[in-house]
Image: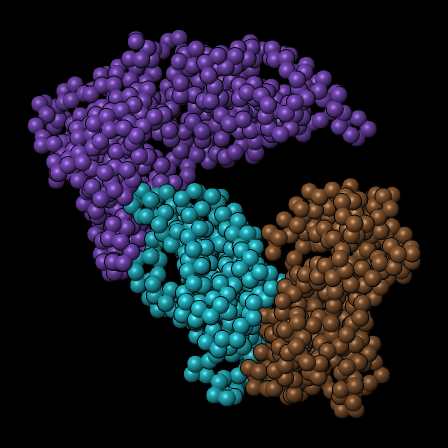
Amino acid sequence: MMPQALRRVLPQILTLAAVVMLVTLVFPTFLSISVSDGRLVGPVIDILKRGAPIGLLAIGMTLVIASRGIDLSVGTVMAICGAVAATAIVNGWGLGPALLLALAAGLAAGLWNGFLVAVIGIQPIVATLILMTAGRGIAQLITEGRILTFSHPGLAFLGSGSLFGIPVPALLWLAAAIAVTLLMRRTALGLLIEAIGVNRRASALAGVNARVLLIAVYMASGLCAAVAGLIATADIRGADANNAGLWLELDAILAVVIGGNSLMGGRFSIAASVLGALIIQTIDTGILLAGFPSEYNLVLKAALVIIILILQSPRLAADWQLWRRSRSGLSGSHAAATPKPKESLR
Amino acid sequence: MLLSVQSLTKTFPGTRALDGVDFELAAGEVHALLGENGAGKSTLIKCLTGAYRRDAGEIRLEGARISPRSTSEAQELGIGTVYQEVNLLPNLTVAQNLAFGREPRRFGLVDGRAMRAMARETLMGYGLDIDVGRDLGCYSVAIQQIIAIARAVALSGKVLILDEPTASLDAREVEMLFDVVRGLRDRGLGIVFVSHFLDQVFALSDRVTVLRNGQKVVTEATRDLDRVRLIEHMLGRVLEDEVVAQAAGHGAGAPIRPELLRAEGLGRRGMIEPFDLRVGVGEVIGLAGLLGSGRTESAELLFGVRAAQTGTARDADGEIDLSSPRTAIAAGFGFAPEDRKTDGIVGDLSVRENIALALQARRGWTRPMSRAEQVRLAKDYIARLDIRTSDAEKPVGQLSGGNQQKVILARWLAMNPRFLILDEPTRGIDVGAHAEILHLIRELTSGGMSILIVSSELDELIAVSDRVIVVRDRRHVAELTGAEISTETIVRAIAEEDAA
Amino acid sequence: MKLNGLLATAAALALTAGAASAQTVGFSQIGSESGWRAAETTLTKQQAEERGIDLKFSDAQQKQENQIAAIRSFVAQGVDAILLAPVVATGWDSVLEEAQEAEIPVVLLDRQVDSSDDLYLTAVGSDLVHEGNVAGQWLVETVGDKECRVVELQGTTGSSPAIDRANGFRQAIEGHDNIEIVRSQTGDFTRAQGKEVMESFLQAENGGKDICALYAHNDDMAVGAIQAIKEAGLNPGEDILIVSIDAVPDIFQAMADGDANATVELTPNMAGPAFDALAAYWADGTMPPKFIQTESKLYTQADDPMGQYEAKKGLGY
């Protein structure tokens, strides 16, 4: 069981190691970690902390994509939940209600998406596009169009506090990743979600409650986005409805893809998606640390992502195997019949 | 001979879709191609039009060997096709559709006037006087069909394949289309006509070829055939020896069985007229009928795939909720659907997971089956049903059709259902697996399970059923028990429509 | 707020021209995409009220066609002048000609158009290069001869405020070799990006100990950066000097707390100078210059930041 799970995420671990090495080349003190005021400080710690929103979104997105869906609204839901929390805090309702309201807003957004997809039968990309577009307006209505600043130490703690020297956002996404993985693999949820992702109709005929599961999956995504939104809002001590989580849904989808999960649904690995998120965040932070002019940021990121995706593509892996075997065949022993790369009918 | 096909063979993983099929088409004839789902009609057509590459055999057009590699290549060779769904562009004008890809040009630009004149002239030849400058989408499906035919004839001009062209037309439109087809025949085209409406076959075709299970059953002149013979050919009648031997048991005086459940007035508009059904404990009920008669629809209502609008089902304990598959499963029902690939297997998941799926779904997500439990279950059924797979972790999509069917059976047997519905359980399955599945059905009923089997293979129905219900025109029209069950009685019940 | 805007538009369209003895001015606003623009709307209404001008307000929701429709309706109502904050620079010729034919003067607010300058009376706006220059001059005066390594948080890459504010700052520090811009990266004008990029600056510059000052192209990025500096255990405003542009309320709060040092105001009061120019024009036909530059006022901790915060808080930032 364990070695198999490890083998699944090996490409992602190798990629992450390669990206880390690359960044260390241009920024030699990248791996240095020091302790200051009882908390760990260093670029790596920054990545663990900065990677929280995209890591959390990637967890929820993995489940949605496993069900053969996609959730474009998560960036916007972050903005809504941040706005809700900040409004509650500014109005003096206290930390508890603020957090609960924000999480409830995330769940409600997920319920809406799930309803459109599972009950009405709208294509996921269209259904979630609705909230993606409309949601920023909702967030702006909540904050009345300005950055809603607060100074509540409890809420700020979520963004910039630390426990045992580790930043709270890093702990939150790690905890979420472990909890969701356990929930999926220690119950039958993982199997049932994979089944509806591969063949919803056949699963429903086998008695799987596809409709409820689909709604649950979008609600989980909404909840992850809510936590991400809380962290983003707590981080800058203000709800920025215009910019919170902007375009982050695309990074989350990218993380899931770099994690080797198929956009066609089915088999999924949360650990791999989270590693994908870390890879993206390492690239982002690495580019900032490297000190290139900002015109290069997006081009560099795109170039690195393309290289990673090409290296991970199954066809290339098969060709590589073939090439290696033919080499070993030349250098002596005849390799056994080389398996052909899998052909697909479609 | 205009077109001649010899020993055409095409194999897909797990199924032999075409098995040494011969087919001939003369110039100036309409040749109907008949067969149930999966008989090989569409595979044959796709080999002719270049959509599939054949594995063996040869195709000759006007004596020359051809191997079209794409539909456009087949078109250039002279083989044009018109499908059930019009495959033209509704947002272009009629003239643009007719000229698409070969527009008349003037100084390098499309000459709109010449194009429209050409289109008008072409359509006049089909007795169609319409405004060719309007969008194709403005016209009825029948007119669009004729335009599609006109385009195919203009492009190809030797062989015209009509694949279920009348499926969405009303009677008057069908007549209009037939006039066009007859006109083309008289001009010397060879026309292949695929349809499952027997009336239309008799009205239009000169010869008929029937396919079943990937093999040619017969080619005969239409006027020499009657409806009963034709249905016999389509549904098959020659029994395999083994099955006959085992079937010999039933026939004499069916035993009185305690009733398991009773459905009354179950129906849904557009699917099936309200029907009654009694199911005895340990009984096998066969549903016979042609494609589209309502046989699959009856099965789907019983399992809640589509909810019934009228009627109820009850057992000894009271009413049974059949509003969804989940409630039907809760009532102890199981259902192996006709289309295994889209409705049955979960292709990317393993054999183990596919077998455990229904059981796990019933237990709920909070009570997962341990991996060991799943492995034991899978091993058990792989041995019991002789599922041929390298191991239980292989994705089920990589198994052959027969083994996929066994995996689905295993999924339901693991649930220990009291009533199992099997829709075409042996379609596309090789002979060995076919017999095994029939064996299994008998074995299960002797253990007290009740089974409803839908099949277009008459011999199979006759072999296993205690009772056969004949479905025609969305109605249950006859019920045959014991000694009444024979090819003749069933075929007659199916064909009766004419007599009425 | 949006609802108010719509109601105001409806009211403006319902009223017919020439009813009141007071001057009537139509104002076509882009929308309310930022706090600054909301403040501009609020101040324009305030200025009109103070002068007894009847202001017809129309919110274009970021759409040029809405602005053109609003101007046409203002012309039809026969207003005495039109204020226009154009959403884009091109495509205004014909509607401006219509206003000219109706002899209604048009004043552009805070953004320019590509049309010929005789189609409008004047344009009121700030000079982005000048803003950067004021910020740079403040730094030059504050650090004197001391060595100073500056990090810069730029606006959205390629946007004109980012380019002009960067250039203005560089002009000001030119010739002062003790001041050097060591790192420059975009923070996209947002608070979150400002914080994230500042964190990387701190990591890259010896935990921030090598940084003497931060120049941020807007206050929001500066507010984010201040948090990053605090979390790195440094004291913003003392260990690292902070100068930014815009003068939104939150930066005054930071200055009052001693976390920020200076900001250059991009005044939302574009209407004041516009109304002044209009008053002179109405009185005796005085033609104002074609561009009225608003003051780019520098605020420091000495300028009663708390008072400024209170004054600005209610403007809708």
Q: Is residue C211 above or below residue C252?
A: below
Left or right: where B278 falls relative to B166: left
Residue farthest front in this picture: C21
Question: Which residue is at the front of the view, B449 or A49?
Answer: A49
Could you say which chain is coloured cyan in the image?
A
* Residue A99 or residue B142, whichever sits in front: A99
Q: Farthest residue toward the bottom?
A: C146
Name the residue: 80% across, 59% down: C275
Residue at horizontal 79%, vertical 52%?
Answer: C23
Residue C99 picture location, percent across and down: 83, 46
The chain displayed purple equals B
Decide if residue B168 is in sight here. Answer: yes
- The answer to which of B107 and C89 lies nearer the viewer is C89
Occupied quadrant, residue C201 = bottom right
Q: Quadrant of the N terminus of chain C?
A: bottom right
Q: Position of residue C122 (x, y in %)?
A: 85, 57
- Horizontal arrangement in the rendering, residue B442 relative to residue B394 (left or right): left
Residue A320 is at least partly visible in this image? no
Is B417 rendered above or below residue C109? Answer: above
Residue B77, position as x, y percentages in the image:
60, 26
In x, y percent, where is residue B216? 38, 24
Residue A278 vertical position relative to residue C42 in the rendered view, above or below: below
The colour assigned to chain C within the rendered structure:
brown
